[in-house]
Image (cartoon, coloured by chain):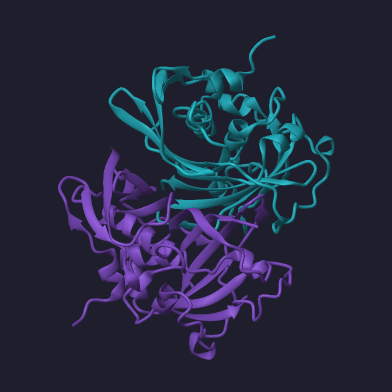
Chain colours: A cyan, B purple
Amino acid sequence: MSVHAFDAAIALAPQGEGAWQGHTSPAYANMIGPYGGITAAQALNAVLQHPQRLGEPIAFTVNFAAALGDGQFLALARPARTNRSTQHWVVEIRQGDHAVATATAVTALRRETWGATETPVPDAPRPPDVPPSQREGRVEWLNRYEMRFVEGGIPPAWDGAEEQDSRTQLWVRDKPPRPLDFAALTSIADVFFPRIWRRRARLTPLGTVSMTVYFHCSAAQLATTGTGYLLGQAQAQAFRDGYFDQTAQLWNEAGELLATSHQIVYYKE
Amino acid sequence: MSVHAFDAAIALAPQGEGAWQGHTSPAYANMIGPYGGITAAQALNAVLQHPQRLGEPIAFTVNFAAALGDGQFLALARPARTNRSTQHWVVEIRQGDHAVATATAVTALRRETWGATETPVPDAPRPPDVPPSQREGRVEWLNRYEMRFVEGGIPPAWDGAEEQDSRTQLWVRDKPPRPLDFAALTSIADVFFPRIWRRRARLTPLGTVSMTVYFHCSAAQLATTGTGYLLGQAQAQAFRDGYFDQTAQLWNEAGELLATSHQIVYYKE
């Protein structure tokens, strides 16, 4: 059996206490540097691989400090604080003498409690009834995801037409399918094309600066989700002076809200 | 003129390169340890005070690792990466040998661009037409904010009644009024009482684990906002197995969206 491209991309080789060597993956190349979602997954993986890790991810924030150069990087993860049921992590990804990303994570032992979902899963046709996007070839990482846009797809023309809102809904999963886990879910949280391209049909240059993912799921729930599709929804709240934000939700086909995510993105005019 | 309680609370004394000594403030005491918003403001202030800081805050994430003990703390802030127009910060708040909070921040030089707000300011009566909350005395920090609940106030009784949603809207400002700045805005982002208390009228024990603030404003815009009220809105998206999230927006009286915020909160049943 061959290794899935995602597993190859997030693989880390131990380099001693809290240090791992990874490498950028041509399979997840973006316009400049790697797809942000894969960098996020690599940073989280340094926590997931850590022998001192307590529990499962609750919150994860990654800050993209610079485009990674092709090749090796060092991922450093340290538990800044370990409590009885929660643990706080500080992560840095370095190339040479420079930080290219910083991150923090909270992991925890969860217990079953009363629960409720307040953001309802949108009405959407089932995945087989939505045609897959045919955007292959433009940047390599797009070929690693199957995307079926329910609403708010890529503008048909870059004619500067302004839309009323920036909302997108799509069915998405790894291509080829791969059983969902925390690393893959983190990467998918960054899968939405930039909200400013949706709001205004212009290829504005941009780059994500910071992304946060909150996990509302357990490893067992992810295992049950398996290779099924996720319904993703993303929308901006504000575009202002070179930065816009994005809020996002990811549900599985059973309608369970697995993760909510936010990011802030630099744009240049 | 006496110093405002907020300025006294976030004051930091330089201790050499990137290190500051601060102290917890009885004026912002919570049930256990300090109000999270004031810890967040103290952590951000270590960045704001840093002589190497470039530009204004864009994104800020703070992770609450433990309740601070009464007394002194050390705030450590270092620029992990400085680019041409952006800068990435790593912050840690320590008491003795232990981290009590970790944080990351992104600061940047912003340029004027096309902009838009997509989350519309809610219809609300003007601040003088909304009675102030009379919750004084329960915990001290509540006395530091003037809160006028437009919708979704504190439940009238802790009878376990379950609501359809957890949304709250309120007018809020420092009490006594204080001109708004990034530190005060960060603190106000945490001002909403816990969403699970709004959703179910039960005094569930809890604590914020991680909070992120995105700034959609400039220092000049904050200066114009001055001592005016902010309209705050907060709502949860999911409550699951001991953790719930909160999304929040803060507008000024002119209807400008100054900040969006998210947090994830531990709760115990």
Q: Quadrant of residue B49?
A: bottom left
Residue B138 x/y as whole percent:
48, 78
Residue A122, above or below A41? below
Residue B49 visible within the image = no
In this view, the residue in front, A162 or A55, is A55
Report the number of numbered marks.
Answer: 0
Residue under the image location 42 percent in, 65 percent down: B35
Q: Residue placed farthest to the left in the image?
A: B16
Q: Is residue B106 left or right of residue A246?
A: left
Residue A64 x/y as whole percent:
42, 38
Q: Is residue A123 left or right of residue B195?
A: right
Residue B255, above or below B15? below
Which quadrant of the rendered structure holds the C terminus of chain B? Answer: bottom right
Q: Is residue A122 left or right of residue B150?
A: right
Residue B194 x/y as whole percent:
57, 65
Residue under the image location 70 percent in, 22 percent down: A176
In this view, the residue in front, A50 or A142, is A50
Residue B185 x/y as whole percent:
39, 66
Q: Residue placed farthest to the front in the image?
A: A84
Residue A238 visible within the image = yes
Which quadrant of the rendered structure holds the N terminus of chain B? Answer: bottom left
Residue B213, above or below A63? below
Q: Quadrant of residue A99?
A: top left
